[in-house]
Amino acid sequence: MKKITIIYLCFLLFHFNASAQDAIITVNGKVMDSETSMPVPAANVIERGTSNGVMTDFDGKFTIDVPADAILEISYIGFASTEIRVDGQIDIEISLEPSASALDEVVVVGYGTQKRGSVIGAVSQVNSEELENRSVTRLSEALTGQMPGVTIIQRSGRPGYSAGDISVRGVGSFGADPSALVLIDGIPGNLNDVNPQDVESVSVLKDAATAAIYGSRAANGVILVTTKTGREGEIRINYNGYVGMQEATELPDMVDSWDYAELYNEATGNEVYSPEDIQNYRNGTDLDNFPNTDFIGEIFSKKPVQTSHNLQVSGGNKATTYVVSLGYLNQQGLLKRNDYSRYNLRLNLTSKISKKLTLTTRLSGVNEVINEPQPPAGIEFSDMGGIITQAVRTPSNQAGRLSNGFFGSGHAAMGTPIAWLESESFYTDKPYSVNANMRLDWQAFSNLKFSLIGGYDRNTRLQKSFLASQQINEILTVGPAELTQTNDNSYYGTVQGLVEFDKSINEHSINVLGGYSFEKDHFQTLSGFRRLQGNRLFELNTGSPNGQAANGTAREWALQSFFGRLRYDFANKYLIESTMRYDGSSRFPAERKYGFFPSVAVGWRLTEEDFFREAFPGIRDLKLKASYGEVGNQNIGNYPYQEVLSADYGYSFGGSFRTGVAATRLVDPLLHWESTTSFNAGADISIMEGELDFSVNYFNRKTSDILYQPSSSVSMVLGKDLSETNTGSLRNSGWEFSAIYRKSFNEFSFNIKPNFTIIENEVLDLGVGNVIQPNGLIGNGSDLFIGHPMNIYYGYVANGLYVDETDVENWADVSRVNPNPQPGDIKYQDISGPDGVPDGQVDATYDRKVLGSRIPKYNFGLAMGAQFKGFDLSVLLQGVAGVEGYLDRHAGFAFFNTASIQKWMMEERWTPENPNPNAGYPRLEVIGNSGTPNTELSSFWLPDASYVRLKNVQLGYNFPDNNFDDGRIKGLRLYVSAENLYTWDKYRTGWDPEQNPKLTAEESFYPIFANYTLGFSIDF
Amino acid sequence: MFKNIYSPILLLVLIFTSCEAELEKAPLDQFSSETFWQDENDALLALTGVYRGTMTLNTSVNMNDWWSYTGLMWLDLATDDGFDRRGVNSPVHKLTNGTNTASNGFVSSAWETSYKKIARSNDFLNNIQEVPMEENKIARFSSEVRAIRAWQYFNLAQYFGDVPLVKEAITIEEANSMPRMPKQQVMQFVIDELKASVDALPTHAELPGEERGRLTRQAVLSFLGRALLAEKDYPEAAVVYEDIIGFGENFIDPDYESLFWEEGENSDEIIFSTQYVADEGANAMYQHTFPAVLGGWHFINPLADLVMAYEFDDGTPFSYTDPRYDPANEAANRDPRLGYTVLFNGESLRDTGHRYITHPDSSSSPDQLGAGKQATQSGYGIQKRMDFNYSGGLRNSGANIAVVRYAEILLSYLEAKLEAGDAIDQALLDATINKVRGRASVDMPPVTVTDPTQLRKVLRNERRIELAFEGIHYWDLLRWETAETELNADFYGAPFPNATRMQKKDGQTDPYNRWYVMSRNFRPQVDYLWPIPQTEVNINPNLEQNPGY
């Protein structure tokens, strides 16, 4: 009850401050460009300290109801923001000074907006103009490289899936999921679901000062997506569409069958393929018996098409503004029968119910359809990923198609990827999501506002997986056909209340926000399985109840929060801001449910000081800022502290299967939040008359009480798995630099926006996991060690390859790793021994070290734009450095588990004829799925995965207005665009360094795309 | 004015008070430990969970339970009987090829899954006493779990030697500091527990059909017999085996071949078997063991050494120089069990219409030897337990897998009598080994030697061929301490006299034109014990490593 009392007192306090009320008047105004005296359309006009605002129309005109003593803030990109006191005037003309300064930009922050100039936390924002016309299917791709401190890596190009790995200022936990919190108009959501064309801005809150208002889920940054809202004025219709071709950025390049045969002989040391066989492969006349099949080429049909159509209608009058948008995206996949469609519908409606009441309604629906081919039933893979993985694996001397129309049997007598792709199997995944989000703002007084927000999300997902029976050839038929149908449903609801108070007295400005939020989520799933009678009907009822199965489960979580923010500035010179959040989560035990997350930030605008301005007249704006705070993370399972018996341990007696239960994990009944303390210090500077803005930030995030399952630190003698416990700490520290340079000469203007980030990731402590390894490293002995980054590669140091027998004899004893070292094998370095010095013996205990990390240390982006007359060109370069890649299994090793061999391995291999100690691939050998001594993880297999990528190039032309005399068409733009156009890297041929895929049994790879599109945008 | 402001406050207060209770959430699809153990049904659910243990019901190739097919059959791939298709770097092969290390995944799986089953048993025993149910049922359930737990310790002690002995729920700190208990004391615990478990259990005949698969007196006594043989307490072992025989409820099945198929799974020869049911609780053995032509992964590759162990059908030892030997038809004129156990080049696979063709020159066959296919490594395949007429999914077999057969009891009884130094007479031979080899479908001439040294040789060979690929031979080689001689050799596969492609040892053609498979190099000072997993030694400084690792 104490909390309630405090809130109540706050309310009372606001009331007394707010008791003076002013008369409301209607202001008609016009906004013009001071240099050209042309009207400025679409400028923002906002009553200061409120959300009451309108946009100017085509003629730069606006109408707004405000108190007679209100202050209007007028802002537009490219112009310096201006404030004007209404002072009872009802007709106002405002001139905007052109400005290139980004300091005037409006930045979306937690539960509100701020001007860039007064932001003292670390926030990066990308606005619609940087996202528009990008021919990407996912919003996350459009964000890549645009913001310092935000690392986005596409691990897969699989249409319709994977928003990529997004991390803000490093990977913040080795326990709980370190993903950023994504909020779409204030409601947690999925970046993939948003139509990039609907987005007004994407803002990333990176430090505790800005993120702490989201408390328990903000430890790894908060991504705020704001969708467009309508503007007052006549109806505007925009159509934007493109069509383009896609291709894989890289595809593995496999050897021809005759090379395969020769290399296989070399690998075995036997004449498995006789010279006649090899000649037959070369001749290519008996393709049934001596084929040369390009599995990769056949699986990935070339250059699929991608199209997108977007229609947006907006407009409104004084009472109501609206945006209605319809989006359609279709992306064909690289495989047959693989495509992705997304239908977006959005209505954003702002209704002025009365002078004091505004209702904002945002309704959106997303309907996606993903189609994928699948292999037939009865083989060891059941999804498209398996087909791709096998295409990488299957050697070219396996027959794909036979001359009699059937297919080759493949290495496991189950067919090959080519046959499977022709099967009648299919997979469809149809996620539907409906989101309703309403916000009622009550401007009780000119400086006091109450808001009530209600949000509801409903997600349904229908998945149908049909595995057909298929006749591979005369002797081989696989099956029987089977169908699995799954239905997921989730419901999310939230109710939030906000109160905001804003007051300026002389040079003191104060802004207070208080709020309450409750969120609840329920997920349930149901699936059914039956074997079907052939490949004709695809509903469960058509199958046999014999062997049918049904599965289902459900889970829930809830979160209750109180939060507040206090901002104060003196003369816009000294700024201070403090936020706090008090969160209660269902994921923690009763006595530890609540967590408190405070933060404070201070800023000093030196350019507001007279002495500074006199001393440095060239500096237009300089702000120093620092912040410190604590944020939390609770991204773990829903019931981590409760001791349960799982019902997954059934067993059969007497020929029938019985349910069985077991308690298999040890829980920590005192579990609580993972928390991150975050320090940020930075400076924003604007010089050269606003042509150059520069920002630098240092950050230091320390995550403690990490929610980690320390299984590898506890002896297996315990006999149980461990649930999460709070243990260990981690640091992400580094620097962010970003700059904007803009310049225009008459009709030519250009801008350059570089950004650069250095992130140092270091494990500080593992708590119960602090196991001292014999080699002195402290950690779990495999992938986490104190003093090193996360996601490391831990292995041997390779010192080239043995040249000959003498080399083998003279080298250290490697028998513990490689019992029979041969010329052409990898030379493992003797690093240390039991006495801390090399002992002449290479072994797993003393001779492995941390070789690198999968997390890039350096991230950079460079956006450049130029306009000349109606033409515009934009180029985005993006890259990472300080990262190692690792290709294993079929992707990295030749002849791995009956797999093929890639051309680079052939070309770079060590041979007795050319015993190059620095060859790129060791002597050839046949490798079983347990590997060989050469496939032990060593520095030999870790190519530098740094790259620089030409992420996007776009050339557009805007037809001049006078082309459209009838006035019906208000604007027309044509553009050509390319994504992932070119990459500079030192990675393995055939593999994209960004993906850095691992072909483990669980993980398959899907190439990422480059695309080339042609589009146009037309306004009515 | 004030009235206007109250309403939002009131609303917030209302929301808050109603939401606080929503923060208490309990799992929706799992039982809470606090409210479990209410009645017999709960106890049965938990008992079922103990039987299931860590067994995986899909394609896992790891050792996941001593009673799974991986636990039972894979170990024989480290012996002179077979070879693991995954090659010389397979963790199973490394157990005996002289390169085993403390990071061997098979070894750490065995360690981990044993202790998981032990922890689950300890939980059960800790709770069962308080459950309101009939005393005799509590006694029966507890006995089953104690025997299951003892069986884990039996295996741990056999392969690791001294191991931590955990009898109750322990804390993380205890787990991380527990020392190894001497093997002898662990084995004493095993023997005591098994003895204490017998009486509360039903006999083989008393066990109702719907409970088949649960432990019986005969099953627990069989384990006790193995434990006593391992401890070389032969007189005591003989008594235990006499008990089992004395029940008169188990028999030698006349049909050797189908005994291992689903149709034979309820034979009274089978004393205990792991239970599988298609769809819900199936095994994937066929996926791993079928030949490539049927879509299998051919894990099991019998060696010529095993094939040679089968006598000619008149009971004389096999020889390549004997005129009855036909390289194109090795099963001819031999102990019929050879044909029931090993699959030969050119054989028809029952009614499937497929033939098993392994010849190194048969490039169109998926089972071709030596061409890098996912196929045989020796030219032989396994026939035993393989019902090639099976037409369901290869990972969906409901065939039970026998753990203990009555044949083992009879052979072990004879071994116990022999090693105890008791007089051996023809009557004893006829009641034991000759019953086994004399079953209708085998019908081998009776053994008549009674000289202990000679009989030992005959008996050990009989055990090897009768129980091939049933998870016994590797253990036998260790406890007989013959591994150092048997597993220090070059191993060959099938003969292919006219093949153009042959794998040869150092370029030397084998005198019998057999395919060279690999060599084993068993280290007597090291390989009789497995290493304690390296990660365990790192975590717990009190766990001393076995010598040589």
Image: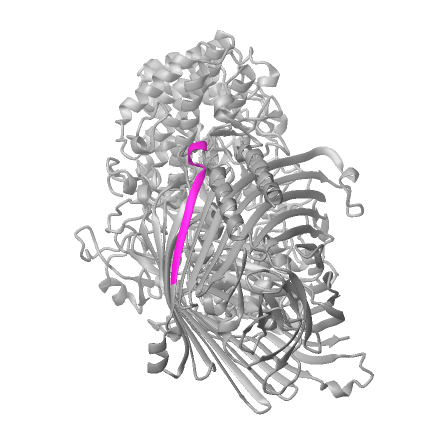
| Residue A710 drawn at (x, y percent) | 37, 42
Q: Is residue A342 left or right of residue A584?
A: right
Furthest residue toward right: A966
Q: Is residue B487 left or right of residue A997?
A: left
Q: Is residue A323 left or right of residue A123?
A: right
Where is A71 relative to A561, above or below? below
| Residue B486 drawn at (x, y percent) | 35, 38
Quadrant (top left, top right, bottom left, bottom right) of the C terminus of chain A: bottom right
Does the segment drawn in magenta span residue A542? no
| Residue B200 drawn at (x, y percent) | 46, 10
**Which residue shows up at 36% across the image and 22% down it?**
B227
Q: Answer with the quarter of the image where residue A351 lies.
A: bottom right
Magenta segment main secondary structure: strand
Residue A314 appears in the picture as rendered: yes
Furthest residue toward bottom: A746
Furthest residue toward top: B135
**Which residue shows up at 70% across the image and 80% down it?**
A973
**Which residue shows up at 34% across the image and 61% down it?**
A851
Residue A269 appears in the picture as rendered: no
Where is A523 relative to A697, above or below? above
Which of B533/A148 is in front? A148
Identify the image's colour scheme: rainbow, by chain, secondary structure or one colour.
one colour
Does the segment drawn in magenta span residue A598? yes
Which of B341/A330 is in front? A330
Magenta residues, as a range?
Answer: A590-602
| Residue A843 drawn at (x, y percent) | 28, 53
